[in-house]
Image: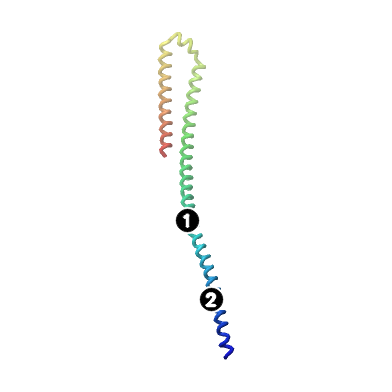
Amino acid sequence: MLSFIRAIPFVGIALLFAYGAHQYVVGKLETQISNQQQQIDVLNQRNVVLESAAQINEQTIRSLEDQNKRQIQQISSLAESNTEYQRQADEAMAIFRNHNLTILARRRPNMIESRANDATADVFRSVEADSRDTEKLNNDEDNK
């Protein structure tokens, strides 16, 4: 028993060293946990920012796709109009090829002049209407 009593201080010192080592290791682990929690918080914040950026990008893509569809429809409409105007121009050129307007103008000046003036006025009205339509389409696009 005497040897047990002599061993108590050594056991106590060993226990103190063990407790100190335990506190040191636990302290380091708690510091690591704290640092990792801070990193998790920062990464969560970055994730929120990236998710909102992704939503904005998706909305922008949808908007651009819608705008692209509208432009395709407008181009199609303009192509149809262009085809019609080209047909009308070809008809007018055929009339000029098939008739000698110089001789006709000398024989009946009032008839040719009034028809030419009426046709010119019709063309100008058509150009003005097309210009208004185009401007309206451009303004509608700018407002969207």
- Nearest to the observer: residue 10 or residue 105: 10
Q: Helix, strand, or loop for circle 2?
A: helix
Q: Tell me residue 112's x, y (percent).
A: 43, 13
Marks 2, 1: nearer the viewer: 2
The answer for how far apart the CA atoms under marks 2 and 1 are is 39 Å
Residue 138 lies, with reference to residue 54, above or below; the image says above
Quarter of the rendering occupied by the C terminus: top left
Q: Label 1's element?
A: helix
Q: Residues within 10 Å of mark 1 (few under 14, many from 20)?
A: few
Image coords of residue 35 (percent x, y) = 51, 62
Above or below: residue 43 compared with residue 124: below
Neighbour tally class for label 2: few under 14, some 14-19, many 20 plus, Cα within 10 Å:
few
Residue 41 pos. (x, y %) = 48, 59
Instruction: Name the residue at 47% across, 37% down.
Output: 71
Looking at the picture, tell me which residue is in the foreground, 17 or 47.
17
- According to the picture, the residue beneath numbered tag 1 turns out to be 45
Q: Name the residue type under label 1.
A: Gln
Task: Return the residue at label 2.
Answer: 19
Where is residue 9, by image quadrant? bottom right
Amino acid residing under circle 2: Tyr
Q: Residue furthest bottom?
A: 1
Q: Quadrant of the N terminus?
A: bottom right
Q: Identify the residue shown where x is 54% and y is 81%.
A: 12
Q: Position of residue 5 (x, y in %)?
A: 56, 88
Q: Closer to the N terminus: mark 2 or mark 1?
A: 2
**Cβ atoms at labels 2 and 1 below 8 Å apart:** no
